[in-house]
Amino acid sequence: MPKFSQSVSALRSSAIRELMSLASRPDIISFAGGMPGNDLFPVEEVGELFRQLNPEAKQAAFQYGPTPGLPSLLESLSGYLERKRLPVQKNRLMITTGSQQALSILARAFIDPGDRVLTEYPCFIGAIAAFRACGADILSIPVDEEGIDTGMLQEMAARSSPAKFLYLTPCFHNPAGILYTTERKHRLIEVMQGLDIPVIEDDAYGDLWFSEEDRGRLQPLKSIDPEGIDLCYTGSFSKILGPGLRLGWLLAPEAIHEKCELIKQPADACSPSFTQVIADAFIRSGRIDSYIASVRQQYRLRASAMAAGLRKCLPDYVRWNEPKGGFYIWLTLPEGTAAAEILKHAIDGGVVFVTGSTFDPEGRRTNAIRLSYCNNTPEEIERGIPIVASAIRTVCG
Amino acid sequence: MPKFSQSVSALRSSAIRELMSLASRPDIISFAGGMPGNDLFPVEEVGELFRQLNPEAKQAAFQYGPTPGLPSLLESLSGYLERKRLPVQKNRLMITTGSQQALSILARAFIDPGDRVLTEYPCFIGAIAAFRACGADILSIPVDEEGIDTGMLQEMAARSSPAKFLYLTPCFHNPAGILYTTERKHRLIEVMQGLDIPVIEDDAYGDLWFSEEDRGRLQPLKSIDPEGIDLCYTGSFSKILGPGLRLGWLLAPEAIHEKCELIKQPADACSPSFTQVIADAFIRSGRIDSYIASVRQQYRLRASAMAAGLRKCLPDYVRWNEPKGGFYIWLTLPEGTAAAEILKHAIDGGVVFVTGSTFDPEGRRTNAIRLSYCNNTPEEIERGIPIVASAIRTVCG
């Protein structure tokens, strides 16, 4: 057996892989993945955009590009982000190989083995994995339906071992499904001010809102641009074009951007020029706006179907929130419930989902379930939800 | 200033970036980059292949794929590698985001800060950067025109602090341009046997041979399949399709593959499905073979033009080898020469290249120059080489 490095010796395969192979079976309804619907991708539009590119742009698609991204995409994406009032000019933008790479690079920039980092509970599994791969000691702070528990955050942040950063998903949280209130965001900023702890804000889902009336709550922390906090903002083309392009971004203060570029260079030299050229054409053609409007509508229909099914079928003791955007609904079961038992019954019935402990950095809390509605038709959702509800009743009574 | 991790605090920007911006100026002839010629990319063929894909394959191009690669590409690439007699079935194959990512992942799999690794001198700059990013202590062993100095390797490998791996590029070395002899490969295998030091074999250029008579020497170490050595073989689509697709591969024993998959998962989830679908179609259509045959011919012409120029213009005290394949010619200047001084004069004359110290893990040896012929027409090469020769004479007499 080869002598692996210490950090890698500790890495173990997760149960997610097995679950995902189950999720791809045609006889199973999968509420497990966070994958956009295959039927929703702008396949024809992108084919057409690629055909129309000039020969130089096509050649550039095959060539290496600068590590921080192709200049043309950095320019068009800057415009896109400035329309969200993000402070692009005061920071620096980098194209990453998915926003997963942005999290991985930030983890390497800040974490030495044993270092403390703060996250929400529940927390995006890709973030947990990226932070663990650097040997982080993760402490998670619960969210309620308005956002992270700022009282507990203040207490945790004041502990003797200072955290290297705080990782948050204020907008259509994966997996909790929540949207932070404006008040909670301002309270959070107050708490973080002067603590000298950078904040990583993950905004992979912010474009997928369902109702005009929530738009006031979509403003990223980064666009509030609070003084005295090093705010690193990550985003992704995965949900607004396609994850198979592997393109995300990081908007960060100059000093952090500089280190992140030094980490990205040996990691993969640059993100794919081929898909950067496509994303650039997608933004510049304006197709991105009409496409997002159309998928927003689709995900709203899917979310409604799931919410209607849950309202109808779930026992009263299950707590959950009607989604305002994004891909997920989070079910909280009575304290002590083993969601893994519910999953077994659901699989027997033909439905798969991910249990809550997967999203718990401490791996202790077992009484939750994440349901994704993103990759199912309303009809599949209507068939699947009663099976989930029945599995819950079988275990919880 | 944010508190960065210890390994990252030490990272510094290299001078290469400045050089590359100079290299992109239209009034400068650049022998600096290792980029394939823009005019050589199979732009039309790939556009046509993409149009002909069935709707399911196009949708898959937009979707996440498994971390080790799309099954269809793993299958077609396995066939491609088996035709080179690589032991694909006894190992496991992974698609990586460029072979640069394969090196980065292997570095993370094996290196803890301060660990010793062995490389050749000179050595690929991307490998040096990937190993340094993990805090490696790199010891480099010189190559001659037949391969690495196996006597010195034996001595180094026997030292008290055992190395975590040995990194090699036996085929059309970057930057040394050499092709290992079969004898040297067998001697190397003898030396490594029983040492319990994994070998990383980088074969990014193996398809770009110039003469049928050298084909016997192209056999990778991995296809010799020596007992008792953990051999990790990396390759790339960058030189046989286009680096902008960001696709490479790693063929490694099961236990190493498993750890590498665990490292890749949080690094970028998967390599771009979009370009994997394209690479798969490129292999299955057979276009890859005709395309490689055509670029081989082009690079041979460029190499010949450069060799002819060097034969005509260089002073006798410069040592170099006629290239048998790949992208590079390595000039060794008299001991003590400062190639950086030669570069200054060359830039004044309108030519840029990379100085040898960039490829020295220890950064001490200053008396070499790497010339790339891959991205220039024979006419540009004929104009540029006299300028290089004149700069050498100005400094060395």
Image (tube, coloured by chain):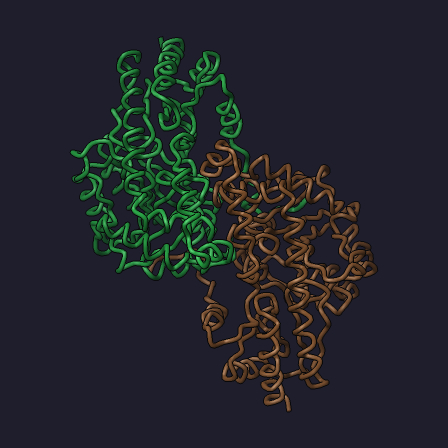
Chain colours: A brown, B green
In the rendered image of this protein, does residue B124 appear above or below residue A141?
above
Horizontal side of A387 relative to A289 (left or right) equals left
Looking at the image, which is closer to me, B233 or B140?
B233
In the rendered image, is residue A263 in sight? no
Q: Quadrant of residue A116?
A: bottom right
In the rendered image of this protein, does residue B289 appear above or below residue B142?
below
Q: Position of residue A270 (x, y in %)?
A: 50, 41
Residue drawn 25% across the image and 43% down it: B154
Horizontal side of A208 relative to B248 (left or right) equals right
Picture quarter with the N terminus of chain A: bottom left
Q: Position of residue A88 (x, y in %)?
A: 71, 40
Residue drawn 66% across the image and 51% down it: A290
Looking at the image, which is closer to me, A260 or A24?
A24
Q: Quadrant of residue B359?
A: top left
Badge count? 0
In the rendered image of this protein, does residue A198 appear above or below residue B155?
below
- Farthest bottom residue? A397
Q: Position of residue B221 (x, y in %)?
A: 24, 46
In the rendered image of this protein, does residue A210 appear above or below residue A194?
below
Picture quarter with the C terminus of chain A: bottom right
